[in-house]
Amino acid sequence: MDTDLNNAVKIKNLFIESMLKPGGFAVDATAGNGHDSLFLSDIVGKKGKVLGFDIQESAIGNSLSLLESNAKCNNYRFVCDCHTRLSEYIDEPVDIFVYNLGYLPGGDKSKTTTAENTILSIKTAMSLLKTKGALLIVCYPGHESGYQEEEAIRLFSEELGQREWSVLRSVFMNQVNCPPVLYFIQKR
Ligand SMILES: C[S@@+](CC[C@H](N)C(=O)[O-])C[C@H]1O[C@@H](n2cnc3c(N)ncnc32)[C@H](O)[C@@H]1O
């Protein structure tokens, strides 16, 4: 295990490891190159499942090849669609939703997540969670649209009722250049 806990993605994975169990149902709302999906697939195992979304065919292709080569079992499916449409594909409660926002590393920077779609998707994901299920969201406020997106998530999540939701916002305080921000939103 990597014990150098120096970024939001690693902290996100710690949360997932502590919550997600074999047999669970996890959704990767921004599949990208498939790294998060692979991580989820390994945890939920052969009795669990992972559903991944991305708007880009190339990202779906990259994710599929990563999992076809590396996943321990065939427990995954990918959908090329916007994550605002989660409810079209999900008809049972979900344990974990993962959002790794922004654009595909090394890809087209215009194909980025947006504040408007992300908030719509987060609201839908929250309606699909099991009790004690959670959303893990990594935001990248170092670029303009990422900054607006993080601001929208902060404003939305700080208004959530404490009786129904636990909301954590986590950021490394001593890192330069607007480090990524992690949100943890758990249904109580
Ligand atoms: C930072 S990458 C995700 C990295 C990925 N989780 C991984 O492990 O490789 C963000 C991805 O979100 C996708 N994306 C952007 N807008 C989206 C939307 N509305 N619905 C679903 N995916 C979207 C982009 O195409 C991009 O592949």
Image (cartoon, grey):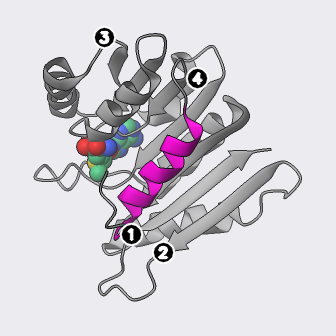
Residue occupying image coordinates x 35% and y 67%: 7
In the rendered structure, the answer to whether residue 17 lies left or right of residue 124 reads left
Ligand 1 position by quadrant: top left
Residue 67: tell me if it is visible. yes
Mark toward the viewer: 3 or 4: 3
Question: On residue 164, which mark appears?
Answer: none
Q: Position of residue 156 (x, y in %)?
A: 67, 61
Q: Position of residue 143 (x, y in %)?
A: 30, 72
Residue 81: tell me if it is visible. no
Query: For mark 1, what is the residue?
Result: 180
- The C terminus - image quarter: top right
Question: On residue 171, which mark appears?
Answer: 2
Dot 3 and dot 2 residues touching (CB under 8 Å): no
Q: Earlier in the sequence, mark 3 or mark 2?
A: 3
Q: Earlier in the sequence, mark 1 or mark 2?
A: 2
Most foreground residue, 69 or 106:
69
Question: On residue 74, which mark appears?
Answer: 3
Q: Main secondary structure of the magenta part?
A: helix
Residue occupying image coordinates x 53% and y 50%: 15
Disc 2 secondary structure class: strand
Segment tinted magenta in the rendering: 6-20
Q: Amino acid at mark 1?
A: Pro
Query: For mark 4, what is the residue?
Result: 87
